[in-house]
Image (cartoon, helix red, strand yellow):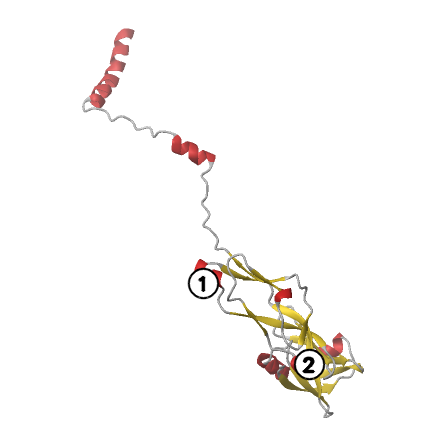
Amino acid sequence: MARQATLEAAPRNGSGKGVARSLRREGKVPAVIYGRGREPEALALDTTALNRLLTEIAAATTLVDVTVAGRAPVKALIREIQRNPVRPADIIHLDLYEVHADEAISVEVPLHFVGVPEGVRNFGGVLDQTMHALAIRVLPVDIPEFLDVDVTALNIGQSIHVGELSFPKLEIMSDSRATVCTVVAPRAEEVVAPTAEAAEAAAEPELIRKPKEEGEEGEEAAAEKEAPKGKSKEKE
């Protein structure tokens, strides 16, 4: 069952960037509420109250009782939150969609994967979660906070597809052929093949210079010293 929350709003006069900037300087967030059988209405929300609410609920799946200027509250879903691209914590606009008890609506609900797959537990596989939310159509009162997907029986190479899922009180709108999750085999360690230059270098024998025997170095040095003297005698 959908969670519920409350939100106070005030009517907003005017539109455009100038009005929106003025509201934000006053600690307000510009918003709009629309839905079946009503004209879109411009609103102003208290920034502090809105930020507190968003930390406490799952915005996409929580019904909000919106009270405008003391009128009877209406139930709505948060359809879009626009944030400052430079400061994402700052909300610059909010869209609310009024819902009716007898009107099925389309929402995206997060998936919650339950259990440890067989292929992960016993064969070192990895659960690859391809989808993280499912598009559904449901009555407002039956909106789930999340949808459980049991992955315990999955082995290496096995998958769950959207068409295999079934939940009470809702219609799945996502493509039935889409893969929800797969258990993939563990990656083998890559062995880097040696380059041609490295292989050639490894094949070449290492040249080791034969050490000179004791006395050789002395004889060569002596010969080099005597050679100039011999040349000078020949000149004489």
Q: For residue 84, what is the image quadrant? A: bottom right
Quadrant that contains the N terminus:
bottom right
Seen at 68% across and 81% down, the residue is 140
Q: Give the image location of residue 190, x and y in percent.
A: 46, 47
Q: Give the image location of residue 232, x and y in percent.
A: 27, 11
Whether residue 225 is visible, yes or no, is yes
User: In terms of depth relative to the viewer, which is nearer, 211 or 196?
Assistant: 196
Pointer 2 residue: 140
Q: Is residue 33 left or right of residue 224?
A: right
User: In terms of depth relative to the viewer, which is nearer, 194 or 113?
Assistant: 113
Pointer 1 residue: 121
Q: For residue 175, what is the image quadrant? A: bottom right
Seen at 67% across and 75% down, the residue is 170
Which amino acid type corresponds to the residue marked 1 in the rendered image?
Answer: Arg
Element class at badge 2: helix
Above or below 167: residue 6 = below
In the rendered picture of this protein, how many numbered marks are placed on residues? Answer: 2
Seen at 46% across and 37% down, the residue is 195
Seen at 75% across and 76% down, the residue is 18
- Neighbourhood count class around disc 2 (C-alpha, 10 Å): few under 14, some 14–19, many 20 upward: many
Q: For residue 204, what is the image quadrant? A: top left
Q: Give the image location of residue 152, x and y in percent.
A: 50, 67
Kindly report the distance in space between the C-alpha atoms of the residues bearing marks 2 and 1: 38 Å
User: In terms of depth relative to the viewer, which is nearer, 8 or 131?
Assistant: 131
**Mark nearer the viewer, 2 or 1:** 1
Q: Residue furthest left?
A: 215
Which amino acid type corresponds to the residue marked 2 in the rendered image?
Answer: Pro
Q: Give the image location of residue 185, x and y in percent.
A: 50, 55
Q: For residue 68, which numbered disc appears in the image?
A: none
Element class at badge 1: helix
Whether residue 236 is visible, yes or no, is no
Q: Is residue 206 left or right of residue 154?
A: left
